[in-house]
Image: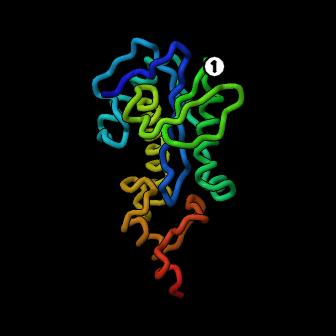
């Protein structure tokens, strides 16, 4: 069952969304929840419906002690690679918190240390601890909103539906009309046999 991380320190949970996408930014969130925070719906954002995530977002924003979002663009992802971009997005979110955390709990097994704040990496942390789950919900909903906005300008890629992930529909559009400035050029946008055909 999802619970608060056992510590007396001020804890910020951190998570990101969009690592496996072909297009759009990687978005991270950092959230410090009050000790008494409870919500029976809150879970890892990947197992929640879009409706439940959208319901949770204003609750988290209102009840958190502080929360922040960090964004890394596709161009930056291509320069520093997706792993470093994920860490940078988290660093940007942590930097924007209005209360300084004393401990960072990070979803996953790797992280580039943030200056002067210790951290713990927790595999599947978004399914174990509330502040990471809350961060996963904010990161996912903010990123989805960005992709919905981009879909208005670039409807051919169906980003409103696929959010930039490598679906058949998305790859078909890339094969037919090519990529654009929001695609990550260092990612394999098309399967090898298609990218070789002239």
Residue at image position (30%, 37%) is 51
Look at the image and tell me whether residue 29 can be seen: no
- 37 versus 55 height, above or below: above
Residue at image position (50%, 60%) is 22
Number of numbered discs: 1
Element type at mark 1: loop
Mark 1 neighbour class, 10 Å CA radius: few under 14, some 14 to 19, many 20 or more: some
Query: Which quarter of the figure is the C terminus placed in?
Result: bottom right
- 71 versus 73 height, above or below: above
Residue indicated by mark 1 = 100
Query: Which quarter of the figure is the N terminus placed in?
Result: top left
Task: Give 64 or 113, whichever is nearer the viewer.
Answer: 113
Residue 20 picture location, percent across and down: 48, 55
Would you say 116 lies left or right of 144 here?
A: right
- 198 versus 5 height, above or below: below
Look at the image and tell me whether residue 124 can be seen: yes
Residue 56 picture location, percent across and down: 36, 29
């Amino acid at each position: 069952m999802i619970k608060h991380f056992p510590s007396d320190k001020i804890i910020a949970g951190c998570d990101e969304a969009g690592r496996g996408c072909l297009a759009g930014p990687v978005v991270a969130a950092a959230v410090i929840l009050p000790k008494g925070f409870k919500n029976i719906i809150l879970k890892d954002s990947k197992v929640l419906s879009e409706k439940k995530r959208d319901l949770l977002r204003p609750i988290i924003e209102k009840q958190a002690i502080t929360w922040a979002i960090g964004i890394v663009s596709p161009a930056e992802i291509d320069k520093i690679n997706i792993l470093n971009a994920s860490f940078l997005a988290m660093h940007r979110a942590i930097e924007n918190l209005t209360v300084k955390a004393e401990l960072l709990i990070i979803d996953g097994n790797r992280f580039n240390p943030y200056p002067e704040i210790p951290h713990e990496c927790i595999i599947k942390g978004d399914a174990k601890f509330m502040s990471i789950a809350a961060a996963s919900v904010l990161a996912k909903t903010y990123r989805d909103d960005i992709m919905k906005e981009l879909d208005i300008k670039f409807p051919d890629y169906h980003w409103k539906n696929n959010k930039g992930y490598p679906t058949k529909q998305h790859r078909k559009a890339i094969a037919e009309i090519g990529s654009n400035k929001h695609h990550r050029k260092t990612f394999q946008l098309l399967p090898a046999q298609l990218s070789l055909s002239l």
